[in-house]
Amino acid sequence: MSDVGASEPTETDYQRVERSEEFQSLRKAFRNFVFPMTALFLVWYLLYALMSTYAHDFMSIRVGGNFTVGLIFGLLQFVSTFVITTLYARWANNKFDARAKALREEIEEGAL
């Protein structure tokens, strides 16, 4: 009589790759860039939102013509988004993509 549930579950290809040193290194590099950048942006956005709510006098200071500190800070939110995107693209092109491609090729060849 065969014991159907007695066999150990086999490891999937993804689980095997996920355990690899190359994958862990790649994931660590990604997290080391993305998490601090995300935290920085969220703090910057939260600062803008809090100042808009609680520092109304400061945010309404006219800098020139109809431009206020609040308007400039709001526009800088867009600028910071583009800067972060550019930094990420440059980082990925120079440091991440080649490693990810090499890992993918290794996986596809069955070497990992």
Image (tube, rainbow, N blue to C red):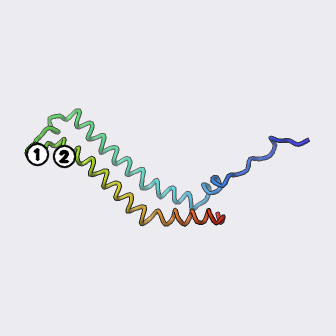
Q: Residue at x 39, y 60 (%)?
A: 89
Q: In the rendered view, does 17 fall on the left or right side of 57? A: right
Disc 2 on helix, strand or loop?
helix
Q: Is residue 61 left or right of residue 23?
A: left
Residue sitting farthest toward the front: 108
Residue 46 image offset from top left, x and y in percent: 30, 40
Q: Residue at x 26, y 36 (%)?
A: 50
Residue identifier under label 1: 63
Reading the image, the residue beneath label 2 is 72
Tell me the quadrant of the picture where the N terminus can be found: top right
Residue 88 image point, x, y percent: 38, 57
Q: Amino acid at mark 1?
A: Val
Of the pair 6 and 32, the residue shown nearer to us: 6
Is 47 left, or right, of 14 in this rendering? left
State the image coordinates of residue 14 (x, y, percent, origin top left): 63, 53
Query: What is the total number of numbered labels drawn onto the structure image?
Result: 2
> Are dots 2 and 1 in contact, CB under 8 Å?
yes
Q: Residues within 10 Å of mark 2 (few under 14, many from 20)?
A: few
* Badge 1: residue crowd in 10 Å (few <14, some 14–19, many ≥20): few
Question: SS at mark 1?
Answer: strand
